[in-house]
Amino acid sequence: MAKSAASYRNQAKALWKTFSKIQRVLGVRDGELAEMLCLSIKDFTRLRHEQRELSTSKIFSLADILHVSVENIWKDEIDYRALVESFHGNQAHIPERYDHAAFSKRRTAVTLVGFSEAAWGTTFANLTLRHFQIHPAALFRPDKMINIHFLTDFCAYLKRQGVAQNRFYEMGRFSVASNRGSALDQAIQKEKNARGVYERVFEELVNVYYDKNWNYGIRQLSNDHAVASIEPRQEVLAALGAGNMGSHLLCLFKAGVTASLLGYKGLTDAKVTHPKCRHKGDSECLYDIDFSEANFIQERRLSGLRQQYPVKHRLLF
Ligand SMILES: [Zn+2]
């Protein structure tokens, strides 16, 4: 439905109210804000007096300087503390929503941003981060913590931008490229086979390198297959003041991360399905992990090496 004239007027009034809040919080004068909006002080004063709407390009100029999105300004969805920090040059600040109850390592955020950059370009990735009032510099240290809401919100934002559901699995698979050369990579490479990788990751590494939001467990484990369960930790839910956390999109991302773990060893991805999900009404999240193909390839490589080198020269296999 087309917007009525009254609705445009109200929107414009709200916009000028947001501008004056921004001025108050940052302590900037009319002339400075006019400059940020690419307006002369004369036009700025007149438009404010008439409470007129501004073009998106003017608001974009301001958003660019303040490191927020146009949407943040239109809806006055701004973390003003983060705005002040950013305005004064602090690029490491994390907005309050993502800074408290922080149980996720930032490496997952780095993977999401890294994939966005590789798939849709640096500008897209930066504009997306800007929407959350986070500078890329804040993510430089993947072992620092961040609230799970950042990952959930980031996925939801991508979905709103038209990213198809199946891309979230692919994003998770990007984690191997994103963590190449890390301590996580080295720890996984030490495992002899696929079974060992999944056992070690779910029983130990996931809490060290990814997050402490969930209790990860292995329900079934054989040489070709595993079933993993993921349940929220009650203390995290209490800290968040929520009955649930994450999202189905984030679960699909996790499925991609899980599938790709064998990539650190140069093996084919596992086939991972997510037959039960708390975000689809099930009582738990279950992941079914089939790594038979990776085993087949590893065995073929080893038998090739056995044929190539006679028994007396074998040292490693
Ligand atoms: Zn799930």
Image (tube, rainbow, N blue to C red):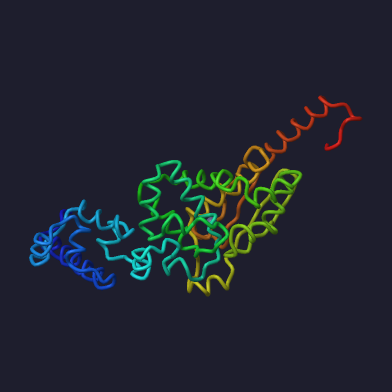
Q: Quadrant of the C terminus?
A: top right
The image shows a total of numbered marks equal to 0
**Which residue is at a point 40% across and 42% down the rendered structure image?**
120
Q: Quadrant of the N terminus?
A: bottom left
Q: Nearer the viewer, residue 160 or 54?
A: 54
Q: Is residue 25 above or below residue 207?
A: below
Quarter residue 201 falls in: bottom right
Quarter residue 192 falls in: top right
| Residue 101 x, y percent position in the rendering | 51, 70
**Which residue is at a point 35% across and 49% down the rendered structure image?**
161
| Residue 189 x, y percent position in the rendering | 70, 45
Residue 260 located left or right of residue 130 = right
Q: Nearer the viewer, residue 54 or 290?
A: 54
Residue 50 located left or right of residue 32 = left
| Residue 114 x, y percent position in the rendering | 48, 47
Q: Nearer the viewer, residue 75 or 281?
A: 75
